[in-house]
Image (spheres, helix red, strand yellow):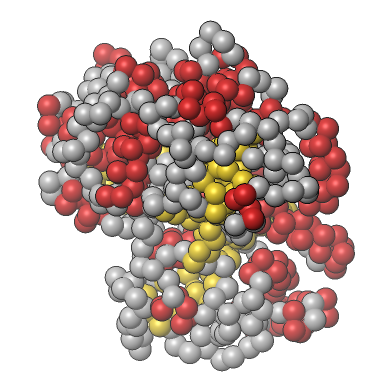
Amino acid sequence: EETPMELGGEQGRWEEERLKTASLSFGAKKEREQGMRHEQEKYQLILEEDEMINFVSTAITMKGTRSEKDQEAPALSQAELKKQSMQEVRRSLPIFPYREDLLAAIHEHQILVIEGETGSGKTTQIPQYLLEDGYTKGGMKIGCTQPRRVAAMSVAARVAEEMSVKLGNEVGYSIRFEDCTSERTVLKYMTDGMLLREFLTEPDLASYSVIIIDEAHERTLHTDILFGLIKDIARFRPDLKVLVASATLDTERFSCFFDDAPVFRIPGRRFPVDIFYTKAPEADYLEACVVSVLQIHVTQSPGDILVFLTGQEEIEACCELLQERCRRLGSKIAELLVLPIYANLPSDMQAKIFNPTPPGARKVVVATNIAETSLTIDGIIYVIDPGFCKQKSYNARTGMESLIVTPCSRASANQRAGRAGRVAAGKCFRLYTAWAFKHEMEETTVPEIQRTNLGNVVLLLKSINDLIHFDFMDPPPHETLVLALEQLYALGALNHLGELTKLGRRMAELPVDPMLSKMILASEYKCSEEVLTIAAMLSVNNSIFYRPKDKVVHADNARMNFVVPGGDHLVLLNVYTQAITAGYFYHTARLSKGGYKTVKHQQTVYVHPNSSLFEEQPRWLIYHELVFTTKEFMRQVIEIESSWLLEVAPHYYKSKELEDSSSKKMPRKQGKTKEELG
Ligand code: CDP
Ligand code: MG
């Protein structure tokens, strides 16, 4: 009866389910049962009909792999799960029946690709199996990389709990700027970037018996670099075991890259997930998310909801909207717990998403794509997927990095949908049309290495490996590499032969971008303390100024109180502006008609409205980064004198380029320079 349906290469996992009778909201049978019907009607009184999201009533089922018998068994409730001991939970994971086979395969092969559904136990169990099998004898370590800081921390905490040890002792984690390990640590979870840095001090990773490159399918920049480095050292360290763990994506490519390493598949135990599409594109996906959550909350049987949004701002806005509407609806609806999760969320808040939902209530977790594969939240039955993610892209010619909300890939969309089928049959509501899924989304995400600035990584590779012969799984664009080399040369990290200089070596040791490390090193003995403070402030992912939606005026006033003349870096701290110039002379812009032009590339750019120099418009300035959001914005800018550029980088700037460089500020509003007049 069921005919396979092609949906953009879904590897036959998709099947069209028989057409379901149209109903106002969700087409599944259950809602039409009386009780639900009643609730639905009540709900329609609460929500105007045109406020409802109109999902296509043809459900497409993403087939689960549980047996019929399994499917009928009710999902374990949170309370029951709690009652079971940790060890029992461990034994209930899909990976457990394959423990012996897996250990045998690892014993037999040096490099093994491990494929398994998210939540099957790869990250938390494999390192423990290896430990139990003696791989940490003689103080050897097992390292497991994660692309995300949050995942490294939460998984390490979970494993420490399972092993009844204190986090930081036998089990620890290491992420940039935070090392929670000790001499006793044998299971070490870390971000991929941290393992990369360990190559600097231990080029053959001699203290490790096993390296697990986890979440390999994410193809982050650092993971891609690790592939090449580890493939290389595996040749002269036959005792080192290398495990490449991935969700069910792309495993053939990994196997191929690692000289046809065998793939160990852990069969999933997923329940089927019904997929719903909207009939027409949604104009405002944030609003559509909010409405869908409420729609599910009122019309659907118990089970928690997971919403995928693109970033902190959106997540906060969505949570606020949900809370506000729940307040308005009051006792007309059951309790809805609204919980955000994103990388910069304080860790105590992050931990909240794992707490079991109290009886009678429903939990909605509003997440970035961190919840796509790195984190598993038990109890999710419904997924809402607007189909977007925030993606970095980089234009080497202009040096412009953009962070733009773009449609996610079909692979991502399927991962997201899969999150609904872990504990019971689930539903995924896609806030886009079936047509868009098929025609507008890319098959897979372009690996980060092909769309990012490589300055940092090239410097690191220069100091640990031979860049020319580096074995990239997917090579970065030539232009990006050239620009990175040019920049490193300009900073003095490479000499004219392209060899690493002493300065370059020292720069590589600092886990920050080359310009920042140059700035720090150049400050030595003069103003290091101040510069270090600024460097630290600049390294915070987001702005240090928190600007909640409902307190915009307050927040802006508070920020204004910090403002000192001179620029954003001085707002962070009042320092000697020249130290910054030494590192960032590369990022200069001069005032010209209608905005600024970068000195080297003549690219038109603008001061970010959040900058303290937004009004001021100094003649010359240095920017920390160039980001495209709605316009080409320079973020964190500081005023300089053009003569300083010649002082710190005579090899880079010719005085001709800096002509017309009166060190005075351009008289504002009165008179125009030659340049401005044309
Ligand atoms: O790595 P993989 O996605 O295969 O699974 P995992 O991260 O090892 O998680 C296995 C199971 O451990 C999950 O299904 C959760 O039930 C549980 N877990 C948890 O409860 N809390 C965590 N922080 C991590 C995992
Ligand atoms: Mg995992």
Q: Residue furthest top?
A: 525
Kindly identify the residue that appears in the image at 36 percent across and 19 percent down: 503
Q: Quadrant of the C terminus?
A: bottom right
Residue 561 image offset from top left, x and y in percent: 83, 32
Q: Residue furthest front?
A: 674
Residue 520 seen by the camera: yes
Kindly identify the residue that appears in the image at 13 percent across and 37 percent down: 108
Residue 1 image offset from top left, x and y in percent: 35, 89
Residue 482 image offset from top left, x and y in percent: 30, 43
Quarter assignment of residue 559: top right
Front-most of residues 419 and 288: 288
Kindly identify the residue that appears in the image at 58 percent across and 80 percent down: 281
Image check: 313 left or right of 376? right
Image check: 527 left or right of 508? right
Q: In the rendered picture of this protein, how many numbered marks are placed on residues? A: 0
Quarter assignment of residue 222: top left
Q: Is residue 560 above or below residue 379?
A: above
Residue 477 image offset from top left, x and y in percent: 29, 52
Residue 86 seen by the camera: no
Kindly identify the residue that appears in the image at 65 percent across and 47 percent down: 673
Front-most of residues 143 and 437: 437
Q: Is residue 452 above or below residue 457?
A: below
Image check: 92 left or right of 33? left
Front-most of residues 567 and 219: 567
